[in-house]
Amino acid sequence: MDTGVIGWGFYVPDEVRTNKDLEKIVDTSDEWITTRTGIKERRIAPPEMAVSDMGVKAAKKALKKAGLTPFDIDLIIVATITPDMFFPSTACFVQAKLKARNIACFDVSAACSGFIYALKVAKGLIESGSYRNALVIGAEKLTAITDWQDRNTCVLFGDGAGAVVLGPVKKGGIKSVYLGADGSKSELLNMPGGGSRNPATHETVNQGMHYVKMKGNELFKFAVRLMAESAYKALRKAGLDKTDIKYLIPHQANSRIIWATARKLDLEKKQIFVNIHKYGNMSSASCAVALCESLSSKGVKKGDNLLLVAFGGGLTWGASVIEVS
C-alpha cells in the first residue's frame, strides 16, 4: 500500500484586509502592491485566535472528507513558525481540542517549506509501519509577527491553515518528496528576537526584533532557482517529467517568483495553481491551502499528478509529487 491524501480541508479567517486598507496604514498603493507581488487581499485572524484554533478548523474538515474521526488518527504534525507558544507544541493543542487519543504530536519548523517537510516525515513514519493515519497541518498567524509600519513586509502576509489526512491508498499517493536547506543564508529571512540568542527584553521589543525581517531582492534570486531545481528533482524521484503534471502548486510568496519558476520549468499558465491574490503569503499554510483548493476544484480528477514546491527561511526548500487517489 502507498501513502496518499485521503482527506483535506482548509480554513481562512473572515476578516479581509485589502490593499486599499493598507494604503491607510503605510505609504503604499494598490497598484504598487499588485504589480510587485500579485496580492490583492489577505486574511487576518482576530487577536483571540491562535494557530491551533485555525489548525483545528482545517483538521475537522479534512477528517470529515476522509470519513474518519479524531480517534482514527495515530499522529499529528503541525508545520508552523508562529506556534501558539514555544512549548508545548501546537500539535499538542490541536490534539487536545480535537479530543484525539494520546497519540504522537509534534511541530515542524521549516518556514514556508514546512508543510512539505511535514509530508515527508509523516509519509516515512506511516510506511515504516509505526502509524496508519496521520493528520498533517500547515498553519500560520503571520500577522502576529508582522511590522505594520514596514511597507516592504506588511503587504505580504496573511493567516490561515490547511490540513490533510494521510493514510494507505491502493494506487497513487505521495510519489516523491525532495528536501533541502542552506543554513548559511538564514539572514535573508528570519525573526531575530524571542529565542535563546535574543530573549525578549524591552530592548528587543523596541528594536522590532520580534517581527519578520526579509532581504527581498536577494531572496528572490535564490527562490526562483531553488523552486525550479526542487521541482525537477522531485519529478525525477517520481520517475516523471513536466508533461505528466496537471498542476504546479508553488508556495504563494510573490507572483513574480511563481511565474519566473513556471518559465524555468517551461509550463503553461493553465498548469500553475495560484491563489496569492486572495490570501497573500501564509508561509507553511500556503502550499497546504493551495493543495486543498486544487483538490476541491473541478479540474482535478483521480490519477492527476500535482507538484508542490516551496522555499522559505532557513533557507529551506522542497517539492513533492502527489498523485490524486
Image (cartoon, grey):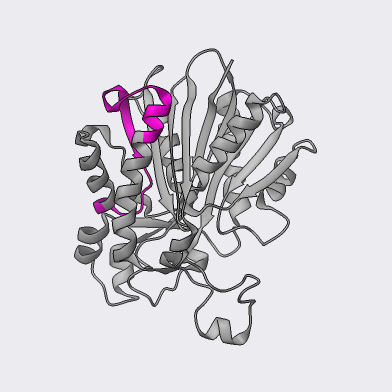
| Picture quarter with the N terminus | top right
Residue 58 position in % (x across, y down): 55, 41
Inspect the magenta stretch and tell me whether residue 237 lies in it: yes
| Count of number-bearing discs | 0
Q: Position of residue 43 (x, y in %)?
A: 43, 56
Residue at image coords 31%, 75%: 24
Q: Is residue 150 above or below residue 97?
A: below
Q: Is residue 88 at least partly visible in the picture?
A: yes
Closer to the camera in the image, 248 or 227: 227
Q: Is residue 69 left or right of residue 81?
A: right
What span is colored magenta in the figure? 233-256
**Towards the viewer: 109 or 234:** 234
The residue lying at 41 percent from left, 60 percent from top is 157
**In which quarter of the view is residue 287 placed?**
top left
Instruction: Tell me residue 271's x, y (percent).
Output: 26, 32
Which residue: 45% across, 53% down?
283
Between 219 and 168, the one lying in front of the other is 219
Q: In front here: 79 or 294?
A: 79
